[in-house]
Image (cartoon, helix red, strand yellow):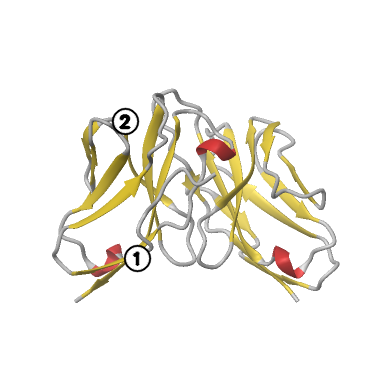
Amino acid sequence: LAKTTQPISMDSYEGQEVNITCSHNNIATNDYITWYQQFPSQGPRFIIQGYKTKVTNEVASLFIPADRKSSTLSLPRVSLSDTAVYYCLVGLIGRAGANNLFFGTGTRLTVTP
Amino acid sequence: DTGVSQDPRHKITKRGQNVTFRCDPISEHNRLYWYRQTLGQGPEFLTYFQNEAQLEKSRLLSDRFSAERPKGSFSTLEIQRTEQGDSAMYLCASSQTSSVVSEQYFGPGTRLTVT
């Protein structure tokens, strides 16, 4: 049920912009893209969600090209506290269940001074 | 409301014993989810409830596992005859049913160690 593919890990220095790309070649017409962040020993935390083009909130931006086969989570000017695992999910809005709640292994981002 | 809470936070048990975990969701959320997470992996979906109805169970949820949400509020996850392979973090999340955003709020998890 591997619906998404992400890099296993990424490294960055403080203050840099970090872009994490997720591939979802088999995304369905009605699927949305959702990103979560998880710190050690905590549950995941919702970051952002989108369907197409660009979505921005106070913590991140999400870029989705026209074909929607990939998406990029952009974290501006990261700090040490952004060190976490980031998960990309693809699924139907408002739907639960295994098909819509597949987290995969995520991308482990390490930010250093 | 302070968010999703789970109890206990840690549980050590011997193989073969039964354990029960509790999850209290955000009060106005009608959906409640259970996940299991092992080291280095993302959360794996186990089951979810909409109000008191259990609507889906993953293949991961063997017959030793049972979950309930009797009044559509808190939920319990019971594991009978625990095995070492059950050692994991068990996460609970809740959300509102919405046609616009499916944002789940996770609890801190219960870490189970089976010796």
Question: Where in the figure is residue A95, as x and y percent of width and height?
Answer: 52, 29
SS at mark 2 in the image = loop
Can residue A50 be seen at all in this image of the molecule? yes
Marks 2/1: CA–CA distance: 25 Å
Q: Tell me which amino acid carries mark 1.
A: Ser
Residue found farthest to the front: A25
Asked if residue B41 lies left or right of residue B86, the reply is left
- Give the class, few, some or many, for how many residues have Cα within 10 Å of label 2's Cα (few <14, many ≥20): many
Can residue B1 be seen at all in this image of the molecule? no
Q: What number is the disc on residue A51? A: 2
Q: What number is the disc on residue A9? A: 1
Residue visible at 38% across and 39% down?
A25
* Quarter placement of the C terminus of chain B: bottom right
Q: What number is the disc on residue A109? A: none
Residue visible at 20% across and 62% down?
A78
Label 2 vs 1, first from the N-terminus: 1
Asked if residue A100 lies left or right of residue A15, the reply is right
**Rendered image quadrant of residue A33:** top left
SS at mark 1 in the image = strand
How many marks the image carries: the answer is 2
* Nearer to me, A5 or B54: A5
Question: Where in the figure is residue A53, as x and y percent of width and height?
Answer: 21, 32
- Could you tell me which chain the residue with mark 1 belongs to? A
Question: Where in the figure is residue A97, as x and y percent of width and height?
Answer: 58, 36
Q: Is residue A64 above or below residue A59?
A: above
Q: Is residue B62 above or below residue B47?
A: below
- Give the class, few, some or many, for how many residues have Cα within 10 Å of label 1's Cα (few <14, many ≥20): few
Q: Tell me which amino acid carries mark 2.
A: Tyr
Question: Where in the figure is residue B53, as x and y percent of width and height?
Answer: 70, 30
